[in-house]
Each structure stands twice: as structure tokens, then as C-alpha cells.
Amino acid sequence: MIEVTNVSKSFDDIKAVDQVSVQIQEGNVFGFVGTNGAGKSTLLRMLSGIIKPDSGQIRIDGMEIYENPMAKELIFYISDDQYYFNNATPKDMKKFYQEIYPNFDRDRFDDFLSQFELSQNRKINTFSKGMKKQLSVILGICANTKYLFCDETFDGLDPVVRQAVKSIIAKEITERKMTTIIASHNLRELEDICDHVGLLHRGGILFSRDLYDMKLNIHKIQCVFKNEDDSQKVFESLDIIKHEQRGSLYMISARGNREEIVRIFEKVDPVFFEVLPLSLEEVFICETEVAGYDIKKLIS
Amino acid sequence: MTSKNLFLKLQKEDMKRRVWTISLSMLAFFLLFTVVCAMKVSNFVYELKRVEFEHYSEWAYGQIKYMMSPTNEYLIIITIIGAIICGLSGFFYLHSKKKVDLYHSIAVRREKLFAIVYTNGLLIYIVPYLINLLLCFIILAVNHYFTMELFLLAITTFVHNLLYYILIYTITIIAVMLTGNVVVSFLGTGVFCFYGSFVVAVLEEYFCQFFATYYVSSKIDDLMTALSPIGNYFNTAKYIANGFGSEVITTILLVIAFTLLFIFLAVFLYKKRPSEGTGKAMVFNVSKPIIKLALVIPLSLAGGILFGNIAQSYYTTWLIFGLVFSLIISYGIVEIIYNFDIRKAFSGKPYLLGSAVVVCIIVCVFKFDLFGYDSYIPNKEDIKAVSVAINGIDSHIRYFELQDLNQNRRYVSDQDYQLKHMDMTDFESAYGISEIGIEYTLRNKKARKEANFFYINEVDDEGSKYLYYTIKYTLKRGKEVYREYMIPINKTYDLLQDVYEDLDYKKGHYPIYQLNGDQIKKVSSYNQFQEKEFSLNTDKKNELLEIYREEISKLSLDDVIETQPIATLVFNIDYFDLLYYVYPSFENTISYLNNHGFDASRVAQPKDIMKISVINWDYVKYTEIKNARATESVGTMYTNMDSEGRVTYTDVSFIEEIYSSLVLEDYYSDNSVLFNVENSIDVIVTIQIDDHGNYIENRYYFRAGEVPDFVKRDIGFVD
């Protein structure tokens, strides 16, 4: 388990991370989302033990991460611009990481390279940005660490490869309970892989929720009431986040489980009602608006 | 630790990243050792077949020895460049965020990472060095040049070079640890290598310029060299090549101690180095103001003194301009480097102001002598002993130190030697001279100030010669205080006489007191009539030394002025000669020399003098005479003068009168402060030295005020 407690980090006068606390359970895929400069990379670099928090604690399986090889053995950090040695080939990098990570799976690495059609002996500096990203994920997966930290890893990957990479990570999570943290400015990229998301803004964490719970607990309902009294009754019974009215058509976002909401609507027997699925983005829009923020300014 | 062999494996991986450095190192040593050795040896072999030269083989061996010796400058330069390159390139990753993210995210402690990279940096130097040295040995052995002496010399050189390689390499790494940019790291290395010497040089210049009594000791030069690892490197190389002396062993031990300290410091800095410092000029915020002030203040002071010295007149005005200008420029440059932004040149103004205040205080301390440096004299009760050096007396004496196991000499300045080897416990007179010295110093300083000009013509009102009087007070608490005064000799002559007659003074003044018969290779003597080399065993040499010391200890300043040496004793030590005058009062020495076949008592008498020629070089008078000759209006005054303006006397009565007023030019030069001469008049005395018509010519001066009237008339000389 990863425990982040009141962690802050400043770079000169700039507060990059401010009093962040979060717990990440084993086997989870945790997404940090936020705009550029929100503090995602800084938080990940602190989680990887690269930089030291000014205050607060970061523990991985109960161990301090900074300058602790025992804790670092458990993690693999893929930075947003992974470094490869000058003139190195994937084979060279494999050899290097083999020395660092004793459980490095060489055969799997070779298989992945074939699968992604990356040459073992081609110089990495001739690779495209996307190919380098693929290689970094392959190295990270094959390191067989308990925790994998990815910083903007899907950025620059084409949709097909992105899906392939996501499915590899998903497989790892399923097979060996790997815990993954993915930092991204793109909420849509996290939607289909994360099960927990933390929204970072100006170094602070606005909220951290379980995606499944969030999706299950917020619903969008389209309906047409027979009269104003019915609408009033529904509004009084529901935990409404927001609503819009276009003529006689109501668009309502409300908290609560689907069955309960359906029961409330059935009670007043409206002319028409439909509970629609919400995208993660829509869920976030609702949540952040409640918190007083304009989501469009927080994520892209 | 993820694997038992992780260290070695990572070391191997790191080596792969540093192939270019390894190649460079191998190439440099291959060219410097293997290729040069092969070229030299093949040339020697060829030449030996072609020419028959008695000492060629010896010379060739000397050339090979030089190649292997610590003084091989090429090797030293390669070592310095190599240490800087390896130091910068090894930890180059600290200047890149991408690289830092990789290296600092892996499960390896920073100490281990440091050890891996650090050890590789050493191996990159050591392995190519030793491989090529071995190849050299093979080439030499095949050609019969290899000896155990050469082997030991090469190993000594290797150890010496390695030591300084590690020192400079570690200093470079410290610069890298403190900075986040390769250019700034390089500049930082330069600062660390020369900062100490620079600060000492600047302070030394301030002491020289503002304190009239400051004594410029060669110890300062030694300190400046010692404070720079590079200067120190060259220095120890020179000393080791001459054989190990106690001084160099101490230096080497200190270098080892500092190197170890620097290694610990580098590891400590690496552990504390924040990864986010990458790309910044200075990684540690705490070091920023310290380094800033440490650079700006001495640079400002240096600028001030530089402008002042260039201008000379209106010294203070230009000094202030230089201080302000250098302060602003150096501060701006440091801030630009810190921020990588020219617009930030004057950010952090409180530090600029602080630097200005510190600079101002330092300059005021020197300019107004706030601590009374020039007027300081220790209390008599606090003084254990004093040593003095008087410039202008016995300038022919050569000073040296026998300093190492091979008895190699190191020449030292007259003052340094005397101040080191003299311990006068009866210092009343020496102290009295200092008091007069302070009085004159303060008077001269005031005159300088009033003249608003840095250099003024420093002559005594009464026309007396100034002497430079350097004194070292050894205080009872162990401290040594040095001062130097310029004093008119007529004010101090009696005190000076007392000092000169003190045996402790003589022991420090004449290095003959540290000589023994074993060290002297040859003894000879000469005067105007003959020259003789003596065949003396050690006991005889010691006997002569003893006699001479006994007699010179009784020599007074009056003797030096009133009499002139009748012979010169020459003590030869290897390749140089020590000259000691024999005065007429040295009866036992004269007797010793007489007994060994040298007639020391024979001096030139007027009857031996064939002629005396006198020329007046007074420019005005000389021109007047020339013009008179041109217009043929020469009166009786110049009738004895030849076409070159020379008047020659052959009459014994004239010769007798002139000769008694003369002082030998060389003797005058050796004791210039003791004599006043008419140095615009040249006197050439031709002395017949045997019955076969052989003669010598010696140059003399008239003692001041003793030019005979007939000579004055003949040469047109006016007092």
C-alpha cells in the first residue's frame, strides 16, 4: 500500500505540491489527473524517491521511499520523457534493467518487443516518440515490480498502441496484483483503466474517489413531467447536483443509486424518463462544479 | 542491494556509457608513453650506431628518465585535463532531469552510485596509464634501457600523478555536486583550483600597496602555490624529482588528508543534493549567497587595486572607481549565471549592498591603517628574539638551503634566509632601529598623502642613503611578526654597528656558519695578483672554516667601510661558488692561506699601478667639454684630457693621492648603503701584476668628497 500523508514540495517560490494526502491500495490503478503544473509529475517523482518532500511522509509498504533501496526495489518509474543511454538499443536497456531489477523477465521483454514490432538492436535514438513510450512501458512491465508509476505514458501513443499498452497493464494487474499509478492531463485516457482517480489542482488534491462508486452514485436523467407538482416532488426527493430545463424536457444530474432514482421517478409517473450513463468526464464536471471549480479549466 | 555483484555490474554498465573518455585516456597515454618511448629509443639506437659520443648513452638515459619523472609536464597536463574531464563526465547525469530520474529512481543508494562512478573515473586514468607504462617498460627492456632505478622512478611518478589526479578529480566532482549546469560546474572547478591563490594574491597586493612596513616574504608565494592544487602539483613534482625532503613529505601528507576530506565532502554533497537542482546554476540554496560574496568581494578588491595601479596618479580616485566598477560587474555576472537571465543581473540587492559594505570596510582598514599596522611594534617584554636583514651590506653573499636527502639546494631570498637563521636575543639596538623606522615610515606616508601621488621620490633631507631594514620579531608566545622599514643610514649607523657586531647576527647573515667541510667540494682564493685552488681534506676545510668564522665574527662596519678586502675566499659547492672576503684584519686566515701557498698579504701598492684613468660622466659637463673641443676654445682646464674625455695619470704622486681615495666598484656594489661615492666619475686603475708586463684593470669610484682638487680641475668636476 502507498500512503501519502500531508506531503508538500516547493521549488523556490513555487508550491508544486501542497499538503497532499492519499492512500493507494494494492492492486489498484490510481489516476492522477490535472492540468500542466498541477503537481502530478512532482508527486510521482516523490513517490519514486527521486525528490524529497519538504514535509509530510511517503510510505510504500510501510517503508520510507526516499533513499531507501528496499522500497525502491518495489517500484518502476516511467517518466514522461524516459532516458535511454546514448546509442543504446532495447537490448542494452534490457541488460541494464536486468542488473537493477532481479526479477526482470527477459523472455517476456523479447516477446513484447516482437508483439510491438520493435527491433532489439535498433538504436533507440532512431525510435519515434511513441516507440520510445512503448519501450518504456515494456521495460516497466518486465521489471516485474509491485508498483508501476507512469507519467503521461499514454501521451503520444496512437489509439491502437494505447489500447494494447492499456491491456498489457490491465493483464498485469489481474495476474499479479500490480499497483499502478498513472498521471495524465487527459481524463479520457484514464477512464477505461483507472479504478480510482485523484484530481490535482495547483499542487493540492481536490478530491480522490473510486471511479466505480463515482459512476454508480451520479446519474443523469432526462424526463418530461405531467405537471409542476410532480417535478417538485421529484426534486425534493432527489439529491440533485444540477438540472436544466428545455421547454418541458428536464435534464437532471443527481446522486444516489440507480434503483432508488428510478423508484422516485416511477412514483410520479412522468410522461417520459430515462436514466443515461455518465462518462467519467461528466462525473468530474458534476463533482468539481459542486466543489466550486470549472472542470474545463482543470483538465483538458 | 538487489544483487551481490550489483556494484561490479553497474560499474560495467557505467563504463559502457563512458567509452569516449576511456578511448581518450588510452589515446593520450599511448601517444605520451608508448609512441614517445618507441620514438626516443629508436632514435637513440640509431644515433648510437651512427655517432661516437662519449656521453650520448648517458644523455639518452637522462631523456628517458625525464619521460618517466614527476616533472614531465605533458604527463602533468594530461593528468589535470583528465581529472577535470572524468570529474565532469562521470557525474554529467546530474545536469539532466531525464538522467536524474533514471539514476535516482533505481534501487541503488547514492553512496553506491557515487562509488561506482567515482571508481570508474579512477580506473579510466589508472588502467590506460599502467598498460602504456608496461608497454614502455617492454620497449626499454628490449633495447637494454630498462633499469630498476627507472622502474622505481616511474612508479613514484605514477603514485604522485595518481594522488593529484584524485585531488583535482574530487574537486571537480565537488563543483559538479554544487552546481546543476555543466558550464557552471566547469567554472566552479576553475574557482576551486585557483580561488585560494587569488585571494592571497589580492590581499598581498593590498598589504604591499597600503602598508609601507609590509615585508614581501617568499612564504606568500609558497602559500599561493600551495593553495592551488595545480600549483601544488607542479611544485611537489619538482621537489620529488630532486629527492624527497621533509617539506615535500609534509605537503604530500597534507594533500592526502585534504583529498580524503574532499572525498567525504563530495559523498556528503551527493547525498544531500536535491534532484530538482538539475539545470540550476547552484543546487544548494544555502551556498548561493556564500559563494556569491566569496567571489564578488575579492574580485571587487582586485579590480580596485588593478585600476589604481594602472593609473598611479590620483590613485585613490581610480581605486574607488575600480572597486565600484568591479563590484557591479562581478555581482552582475554572478547573478546572471545564477539565474541564467541577464535581466536578473542586479536582483538580490541587499547582497550587493552587503558586498559593497564589506569591500568598503576592507579598503578603509588598509587605506587608513585602522589597526595601526605600520606603527606596530611588539612590546620588548613579549619578544623572545629578533632577526634582521639589512639590504645593501654584503650583497655578494649567496643564500641557499640544503633541503633534501640529496642535499639539493634551494635558493632563497637574502631576507628569508637571514630571518630564518638568525636569533638575536640581545635585540636592544635592532629594536631601536625599528623605532626609527616607524618614525620615518609614518613621515613618508604623510608626505605621500600630501603629494596625492602614489610614488614619491623618497630621499632623506640630508642626502643620506636609505637602507631597507627587515625585521622578524619572534614573540614568546610563538608568533612571528615581520616588518620592513626604509631608514636613512646616518640616523641609525651606531645602532647598526651594534647589530653587525652581534655574533647572532653574523651567524644568520653569513651562510658559512651552516657549512661544513663535507659539503665543500673545492676551496680556492684569489686577489689582484694570483688565484689558487687548495688541496684540502675535510679536516683542513673545517679548520679554515673555523678560522674564518672566528675572524669574521669580529668584523665591524667601520672595518668594512675603512678597509677593503685583500683577497677573496671561494668555497665551491657543486656548481656554484660562495665568495667570502678576506680583510686585512683577518690575520689568521691570511696566515692559513700563506701556509698553503697563497700570498694573501700582497696588495696593490701605488708603485704597482701603471696608470689611473678618470672620466667624468656628468652629462652636462661632458657635453660642455665636447662642445669646447669642437670650437677649439679649450682652455688650460682640459689640457690633460684625451679625445674621449679621459684624463690619465701616470705620475706616482698623483696615483698615490688618487688611489687612497678610491673604493673598488664591486666592493661598493656589495656594500652600497655604507658608502657614498661620486658615481658620475669612472676611475680605471691599471695594475702591473708581474715583471713580465702583465696587468689588470679594475674599476673604482671616488669616495664622496674625496676627489683630489687636481682631478676636479682636470675633468671639470664640481661638487
Image: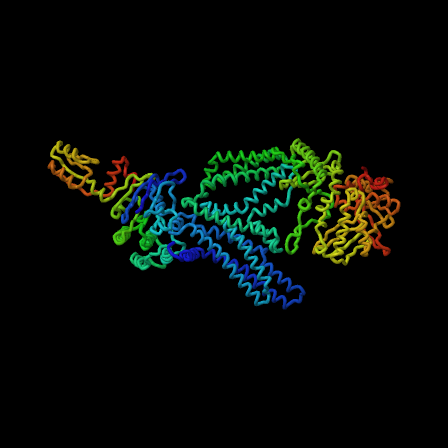
Quarter occupied by residue A31: top left
Please report the residue visible at 77 percent of the width from the left and 41 percent of the height from the top: B675
For the C terminus of chain B, give its image quadrant.
top right
Query: Where is B513 relative to A217, above or below?
Result: below
Q: Residue B380: x, y in percent? A: 67, 36
For the N terminus of chain B, give its image quadrant.
bottom left
Q: Residue B170: x, y in percent? A: 50, 50
Can you see residue A122? Answer: no
Query: Where is B498 relative to B112, above or below?
Result: above
Query: Where is A88 relative to A16, above or below?
Result: below
**Mark count:** 0
Residue A289 as seen in the image, left or right of residue B331: left
Report the front residue among A24 and B296: A24
Residue A124 as seen in the image, left or right of residue A26: right
Please report the residue visible at 66 percent of the width from the left and 64 percent of the height from the top: B55
Q: Residue A112: x, y in percent? A: 30, 57
Can you see residue A132? Answer: yes
Q: Residue B161: x, y in percent? A: 55, 55
Color style of the picture = rainbow
Report the front residue among B167 and A278: B167
Residue B348 as seen in the image, left or right of residue A84: right
Please report the residue visible at 58 percent of the width from the left and 59 percent of the height from the top: B153
Q: Residue furthest bottom?
A: B49
